[in-house]
Amino acid sequence: MKNIILSAKDITKHFPGILANDHINFDLYEGEIHSILGENGAGKTTFMNILDGLYIPDEGEIYIKGKKAKILSPIDAMNYGIGMIHQHFMLVDTLTVLENVILGLKDQGIFINESNISKKINEISEKYNFKINPKAKIWQLSLGEQQRVEIIKMLIRGANILILDEPTAVLTPQETDMLFDILQQLKSEGKSAIFISHKLEEVMDISDRITILRKGKVVGTVNKKDITITDLATMMVGREVFFSFEKKPLDTNEILLKIENLEGYNDRGVKTLKGLNLTIYRGEIFGIAGIGGNGQEELVEIITGLRKATKGKIFLKDIDITNSSPSTILKKGVSYIPSDRLKDGLIPNLTPLENSILKCYYKPPIYNRGIINYINAKKYTENLINEYNVMVPLMNAPVRLLSGGNLQKLLLAREISENPILLIAVHPTRGLDINATEFIRKKLLEVRNSGTTVLLISEDLDELLMISDRIGVIFNGKIVGIVNPNEVDIKDIGLMMGGSRYINNKEGEF
Amino acid sequence: MFIFERRESVPLRLKIMIPIISIIIGLIIGAIAILFLNVDPLQVYKAILIGSFGSRYAFTETLVFATPLILLTSGLILVYRMGFWNIGAYGQYIMGAVFSSYFAIFGSPDLPKFSMLFIMICAALLGGAFWAFIPAFLKALWDVNEVITTLLLNYIALSILRYFMYGPWRDPTGLGFPLSKQFPLNAQLPRIIPNSRVNLGLIFGIIAAVIIWFIINKTKFGYELRVIGGNPRAARYAGINVASKIIIAMLISGALAGLAGMVQVSGVLRVLQIEISPEYGYTALITSWLSYLNPLIGIFVSILFGAFTAGGYLIQITMNVPYGIIPLIESVILFMLIGGEIFKNYKISYLKRSF
């Protein structure tokens, strides 16, 4: 019989208008990886924030090793050995790994024993095969490496219960495997982990037990051995889920977008596009696969006019749009769903209405002689919200209060409603739950079937294989191969993503 | 121990209470300072109240001091809504006064009053706008931090004013004081309430506040401003030309500040001098935030601060309490207002540790 290390009893938390956690009961054994599975808005993150002391529950108690615990802040949580790794890392970009680790340590006195801590970091690093240099600055590290720094922080502070909030959302498949190896090793040492996710495959892969949340309530806790992935999906969503989409065959080979020998630099002045060539046909969904940081971001920003190309040409329907202004490109019918919804796509503190009209506020019926007709704008917004099934509790509240899925639906609605000829979607379903993901993918196929071309950039290979007509693999600033999703072996894509295989063909020439 | 919990939304009650409590704390700290002077603070506050609202004359003086504030506040709110931190209203105000005074001092006293005032108003709008254009242009072109540029331009504007006052524009018959000659009658903004200094500027201010409110809330330009203020990256990607909007908004903001300067010299002082404002340019920062960046609320907040100024001058004369108390109270209010943000972002409760 295993020991229960953490136990939550009847945890309840209200937020204005919603019951985020409704009498949640949860047990965590020593040396277990326990997943919490649920859709966005199911209350996973709220529950974790309660365990970490960021929120105080309205009702309920937490017991650590059988004793009642009062967790009022993350410091308290740390004292009980609970360490949380947030979805957005809590690291100072301009400081080194070492300095970030020191930041959270107590009892340091006036002089900090850096070499001692540095030694500890190296020890942990070696033990778990982290490959982290304590002197590296955070901004130089990949997201996967940054996550490992967070884990180091927690281990040095003596955590034996790790909470990971959607840790794989930002990782490549390889980095995810690495994280899982680390978790398994920690488990074998008797440490416990709470793993939050809505990705069924991952949860089945890593967990010992799984607790499913829906609408703030526990639907059930199951042993992984006793359940199938379909049952899990049904428990999570409350209905059966089908991942199948209808695709109309393409009827054209008219070239819509042609990119020739494109070069460009990232924000740090590193050349990330090194002569990229690409041809996209009208009406297709062209997927771009690749590990983050191989030039995807720069490619998209150059097409949309947000970044300057230093060399090369881009033609949209034979018109040269290279280095045109964003508004010129926008008016030619290019829409864009950026990867960071709140940072690039929406205005967090403005209302759904003000966010919805961003792409059409200068046109009738919303615009009339310098004035915005807010009555028409309201009608327009209500139509969008209804058509795309966006859950908006309060029309006057800022959109930052909406959940990720609803934000993405709103953004997609806004971008599609302008009937673009080219829709660029970057990680459109990242961080979304099954329902929202399904909805977004369906909509992307819908616009494709109605003749819009879609350039889809995603790190989710399953998604690319599911809805793309062709997939191009980007590596080191070039398209290294273009494959047909119906015929390709996923391993080949993986190898191309890693740069160890090239397929030469007309579009992929380099 | 105190528990901080992030708030999802701010209750209206807090939005109302924070400014009120900020003002009360400002008054309490002012009272402590007054105690050091061995004066009864309640008597002082009573005198301020009488000196600002106690009589018809007192109230007109309050309106006189509120007039430039309303104009300045409206202008600042416009650029604050787009996240452009203009703290150069002080300098823009001076430039408005300087530009318009040129015509009052050197223009023909025989010009019809309407034409003269029209020229002076245009000059003031241009002067303020010119001074605001410099930082806006630097921001738009090279992303130069506007806080630094607008602040430094204030000192340059002050030096320019000093140069003219000690130099070419000094009244030769003025016994050496750094003053211009008295403005001729055709350069004096008409007064609209008999036996008071309340002038046409008050009407300008109210019209400006209404127009700015309209621009922000109803027009395409105002919508673009709010988008830029909320998320400049999203604005750029939506095709908004951020640089040009910054310049236009700053031109309007500076022009209103310049007009405030003209109203003061032409409507109240009727002479250009070194001291042309009780730091209106900085007080307007406070009134802007106190009115939640709503120019209509700004009118009333400006009247409140006008009252502080009117009352402050009175206590200086009648009770020998230095006017410095007033800026002290005002700055404590701003301090509290900024500190009050924490209550808007976090729900704070007290919990006893039971172990």
Image (cartoon, rainbow, N blue to C red):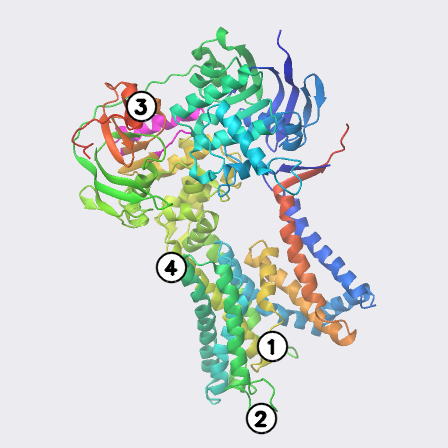
Specify start and end residues of the magenta stretch as a single range. Answer: A426-453
C-alpha distance separating marks 2 and 3: 89 Å
Q: Residue at x 51, y 30 (%)?
A: A122
In the picture, the disc for residue B141 is 4
Q: Which residue is mark 1?
A: B275
Q: Which residue is mark 2?
A: B173
Relative height, residue A8 to residue A258 (above, below) = above
C-alpha distance separating marks 4 and 1: 34 Å
- Quadrant of the frame with the N terminus of chain B: top right
C-alpha distance separating marks 3 and 4: 44 Å
Q: Name the front one of labels 3 and 1.
A: 3
Q: Name the front one of labels 3 and 4.
A: 3
Q: Position of residue A432 (x, y in %)?
A: 44, 27
Q: Name the front one of labels 4 and 2.
A: 4
In which chain is the residue bearing label 2? B
Q: Name the front one of labels 4 and 1.
A: 4
